[in-house]
Image: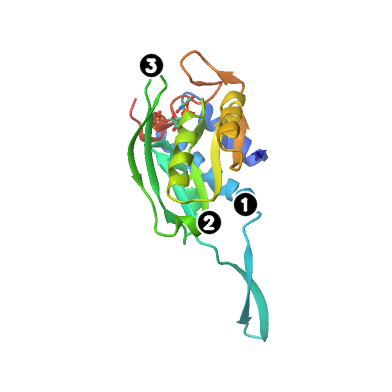
């Protein structure tokens, strides 16, 4: 049932740039990817290492490598905005996709796409979406990933609120949650306050 807020001045500064209403889509995307890249350092702190015999130009020695397959699962659309940053650090990760959208009136979650990778059951699975609001999308995505056989799952977001985190922890107590910010609350339309608006629209310039 763990929740980790990844706090760092670089992340806080970039997130503040993203929150500003006047920030362009280009700057929004760049800052999102940079924050995702910085978060990787903390998220993978406990990834298992395997001892390997290697030879340096000087002598034989033992080194340590990450040998477990890693699967990144962006929740479409906005999760795509964090992918490049994470892949920069873990270029061997495979990508599974889950397409979900929230009905703007009822906040009900609708699924429109899901494609897994072949080795997800043995993988370290990282589900990414910048926004954890009511928690409905995160819960649905984790349900789908568990249905694929994923066991070792982490959920990574940029901005969360206490009610969404509590709902997610109740539904999936085994999943570790990482967030760059715990904001104040949800408003009557299910938007995070102060938040940053609609992440998908800001990433893709659709509004
Ligand atoms: C946004 C966001 C999350 C979801 C969070 O997606 O990217 O997926 O809302 O809200 P929740 O915690 O209340 O479920 P949206 O449904 O707007 O779709 P989009 O990414 O295509 O814009
Ligand atoms: N989804 C978003 O993109 N923003 C919010 O504030 C809440 C859900």
Residue at x 52%, y 15% (from the top left corner)? 187
Near-viewer residue (123 or 29): 123
Answer with the quarter of the image where residue 54 lies.
bottom right
How many discs appear? 3
Q: Which mark is residue 41?
A: 1
Near-viewer residue (82 or 57): 82
Q: Which mark is residue 123?
A: none
Q: What residue is disc 3 on?
A: 105
Circle 1: element type: helix
- Rendered-image quadrant of the N terminus: top right
* Mark 2 sits near ligand 1, with its Cβ under 8 Å away: no
- Rendered-image quadrant of the C terminus: top left
Circle 3: element type: loop
Q: What residue is disc 2 on?
A: 89
Separation of disc 1 and disc 3 at Cα?
37 Å
Which numbered mark, 1 or 3, is in the foreground of this view? Answer: 3
Residue at x 53%, y 24% (from the top left corner)? 195
Residue at x 55%, y 36% (from the top left corner)? 158
Q: Position of residue 26 (x, y in %)?
A: 41, 37
Residue at x 48%, y 46% (from the top left corner)? 146
Q: Are marks 1 and 3 in contact (CB under 8 Å)?
A: no
Q: Relative to residue 170, is residue 85 drawn left or right?
A: left
Q: Is residue 41 above or below residue 204?
A: below
């Amino acid at each position: 049932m763990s929740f980790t807020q990844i706090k760092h001045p670089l992340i806080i500064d970039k997130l503040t740039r993203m929150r500003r209403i006047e920030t362009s889509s280009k700057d929004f995307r760049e800052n999102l990817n940079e924050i995702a890249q910085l978060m990787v350092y903390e998220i993978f702190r406990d990834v298992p290492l395997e001892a390997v015999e290697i030879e340096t130009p000087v002598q034989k020695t033992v080194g340590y490598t990450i040998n477990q397959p890693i699967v990144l699962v962006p929740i479409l659309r906005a999760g795509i905005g964090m992918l490049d940053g994470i892949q920069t650090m873990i270029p061997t990760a495979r990508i599974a996709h889950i397409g979900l959208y929230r009905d703007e009136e009822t906040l009900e979650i609708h699924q429109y796409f899901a494609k897994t990778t072949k080795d997800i059951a043995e993988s370290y699975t990282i589900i990414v979406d910048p926004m954890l609001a009511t928690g409905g999308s995160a819960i649905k995505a984790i349900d789908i990933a568990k249905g694929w056989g994923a066991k070792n799952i982490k959920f990574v977001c940029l901005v969360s609120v206490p009610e969404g985190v509590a709902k997610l922890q109740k539904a999936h107590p085994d999943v570790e949650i990482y967030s760059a910010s715990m904001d104040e609350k949800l408003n009557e339309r299910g938007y995070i306050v102060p938040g940053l608006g609609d992440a998908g629209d800001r990433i893709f310039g659709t509004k």
